[in-house]
Amino acid sequence: MARVMLVQPWNYHDEGVAEHDLSKQWRNGPYSLLLLATQLRKHNHDVVLVDMIRDLVVLKGDLPACLAKLSDDIHAFKPDIIGFGFFSIHYFEVRKAVQVARAACDQIGLKPMFIAGGIHASTEPHKTIKELGFDYAFKGEADLGIVDLADGKEPTTIPGVVGSTTLTCNSGQEVKNLDDLPFPDWSLCDYKFYAHPTLARMQLRATSSLDLIMSRGCVYKCAFCAYNALSAFRYYSAEYLVEQTRYMYEKFAINGLYFTDSTIGNNRRVVLAFCEEMIKQGLNKKIEWFANIRPNQVNETVLKLMWEAGCRYLFYGFESGSQRMLDKMAKSISLEANYKAAYLHNKLRFPYNASMLLGYPGETEDDIQQTFEFLRKTQPPSIGINWYVPLPGSPDYDKLKAEGVINTDDPEEWRRIGEVNKCRVYADVPDARFRTLFTEAERLAYKEIRITTRAAWGCISPPQSEAPEAPQDDSDKALSEARAHATYGRTGLKNSA
Ligand code: B12
Ligand code: SF4
C-alpha cells in the first residue's frame, strides 16, 4: 500500500484576500484529483487530498500560512508519492509549492516521488519536470496509470509517465468504459466549501452545487482549445449519470449540479436519455443543473426536455458575431446556428450565457463590430467577454510558435489567461484601438445590455422571489463589479477585499 498525496495549487487571485463572500463566488472542486483519489482508495492505497484553493481562502489569503499547512500536511502524512494536478495558469504557484514541499520532506528525511499531471504537464512534460522541480510528468489520463504507480511499478514502464530522459512520450492508458470508474468521493475534500450556496452559478437563485462530467474529450477541434490534447471522446451512460446524481443528492445534500464538460452535446442520445431518466425518477424536482453546450447541438424539443429535466442554465461559447472569425477558429459552426440558439432561448425564456472571445489572431475591427451586432440583436441575459490568450495544448499555440509570433514560452502570459488587462493583443487591430474596443465590449455586455435584460429576464427563472434587484445605476462601479464576476480570473477580488 502506498501513501499518495494529491495537491491542487492555489489560485493566485485569492492571495491577500481576507474576506470572501462565498455566496457570490463560483468555485469548482478539485474534480480530476478526486477521481484519482477515489480510484486509489478503491485499489487500497492511502490517499490524502490537499486543496490549496480552499486552504488559502479559509486562511484568509495568508499565503505563508497556506504553504506552512502544506508542510504540516506532509509531515503528518509522510507520502511516498506527491502528485500535483494543474493548468498552465498555475505555473508559478506550482513551482513555489514544489519548493516548499521538497523542503518539508528534507526536514524529516523523506524522499517521495514528485509527479505532475493535468493539461500543462501533458503538453509540456519535459519543461514541467525541469522548470517546476518534478521527478516525473504524466501525459494524458491517469485513472489507470496512477494505480500502477502506487502499486510500485517502475515509473517509466507505465504509459503516460515521462521522466527527464524519456524520449518517446506515450499518453496514459485511457479507461475504455467510463462507467467502470467509481463515483468521485467528494468527502475526500471539504466539499461543503465548494457546495456553498451561491448566486454566482445561476445568478437568479442561490444553489448548492457540485460538479460532474458527462463525457471526456470532444468531437470538435476548435483551434484555440486545448481539450483534444488530453482525451479521446468517450461518454458515461445516462444510467450511470443519473445514479451519480442521486448519490450526490443523497450523500452530499446538494440541490444543484454543474456539468463541467466543455460541451455536453456531443452525444445527444445520452443527453436525452439522461433527461428522461431524471424526470422519471423525480430528480428533476430536486436538482437544478447547468452545463456548457454548443449552439448547433440544441433545438426547441431538446431545450424543452432539458428544462423539464431540471436544466436551468446553459453556457454557450458563441465566440464571435463574424462568420469569418468562426471559420478561422475552426469552430465548425455557422453564425446562423449561433443566432438561432440565442433566439430560441429568448423565445423559451431559458436563461443562458453568451461567452464571446475577442482578440483572436486575424480579427479586424469589422469582425469586432459584428460581435457587437450579435450581442445587440440577441440581447443575451448574461454575457462573458474574454480576451484571447493562446493556450498550451491548443492547435493555435503550436501554430503561433511555429510562425514565431510566440517567441519564447512565457509563463507570465499563461498566468494572465482569463484576465482582461495587460495581455498581449493578437488581433489585426492596433494595440490601443483594440483595448478601446475591448472596453467598449465590456460596457456593452456588462452595462448596456445587462441593464435591459436583467429587467426583462429577472422574472423568468423560478423562484422569482429570490431574484436580486436588477442593477439600476450606470456607474463605472457597476461595470467593474460585473467584470469581476464575468471571468474566473477576477483580479477585482483583491480590490474588493
Ligand atoms: C472543468 C474545467 C474547468 C472548471 C474546473 C477547473 C478545475 N480546477 O478543476 C473551471 C470552470 C473552474 C475551469 C476554469 C478554468 N479553466 Co478549465 N477546464 C475544464 C475542463 C473543461 C475539464 C477539466 C476536467 O475536469 N476534465 C476531466 C478530467 C477527467 O480530466 P483532466 O482534468 O484532464 O484529468 C485527467 C488527467 O489530466 C490526469 N491528471 C489530472 N491531474 C493529475 C494529477 C496527477 C498527479 C496525475 C498523475 C495525473 C493527473 O488524470 C486525470 C484523470 O484521467 C478542461 C478541458 C479538459 N478536458 O481538460 C478545461 C481546461 C483545463 N481549462 C482551461 C482554462 C484555460 C481554464 C481557465 C484559465 C479559464 C479562464 N479563462 O479563466 C480557468 C482557470 C481556473 C483556475 N484558476 O483554476 C484550459 C487549460 C489550458 C491550459 N493549457 O492551461 C482547458 C484545457 C480548456 C481549454 N480551453 O482548452 N476549468
Ligand atoms: S471549444 Fe468546445 S467544441 Fe471546440 S474543441 Fe473545445 S471542447 Fe470541443
Image: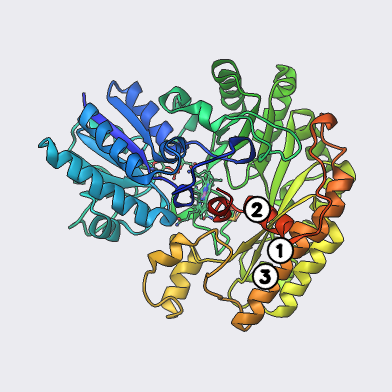
Q: What label sits on residue 442 in the rendered view?
A: 1
Q: How is the image coloured?
A: rainbow
Give the percent coordinates (x, y) of residue 52: 39, 40
Amino acid identity at mark 1: Glu
Q: Is residue 231 visible?
A: no
Image-quadrant location for residue 288: top right
- Name the N-terminal-most of marks 3 and 2: 3
Calculate the distance from the C-alpha at mark 3 to the C-alpha at mark 2.
Answer: 14 Å
- Horizontal side of 323 relative to 229 (left or right) equals right
Q: Quadrant of the N terminus?
A: top left
Q: Is residue 373 above or below residue 44?
A: below
Determine contact: label 3, label 1, CB under 8 Å.
yes
In this image, 38 relative to 137: left or right?
right
- Image: 447 above or below 3: below
Asked if the residue under mark 1 is in contact with the one under mark 2, i.e. CB atoms within 8 Å, the reply is: yes
Q: Amino acid at mark 3?
A: Phe
> How many numbered marks have been drawn onto this rendered protein structure?
3
Q: Of the numbered discs in the image, which one, if any, rests on residue 438?
A: 3
Considering the numbered disc 2 on the image, is that residue within a helix, a strand or a loop? helix
- Residue in the picture at 58% in, 30% down: 196
| Mark 2, other Cα within 10 Å: few <14 / some 14–19 / many ≥20 | many
Determine the CA span between mark 2 and mark 1.
10 Å
Instruction: Give the residue at x 65% y 53%.
Output: 486
Find residue 398 and report its horizontal and vertical position in percent.
Answer: 44, 69
**How far from the left and from the top, in percent, is residue 342?**
81, 52
Residue occupying the point 66% across, 39% down: 201
Query: 184 left or right of 488?
Result: left
- State the residue in front, 290 or 160: 290
Q: Quadrant of residue 180?
A: top left
**Which residue is identified by label 2?**
486
Judged from the image, the secondary structure of the residue bearing numbered disc 1 is helix
Q: Nearer the viewer, residue 19 or 448?
A: 19
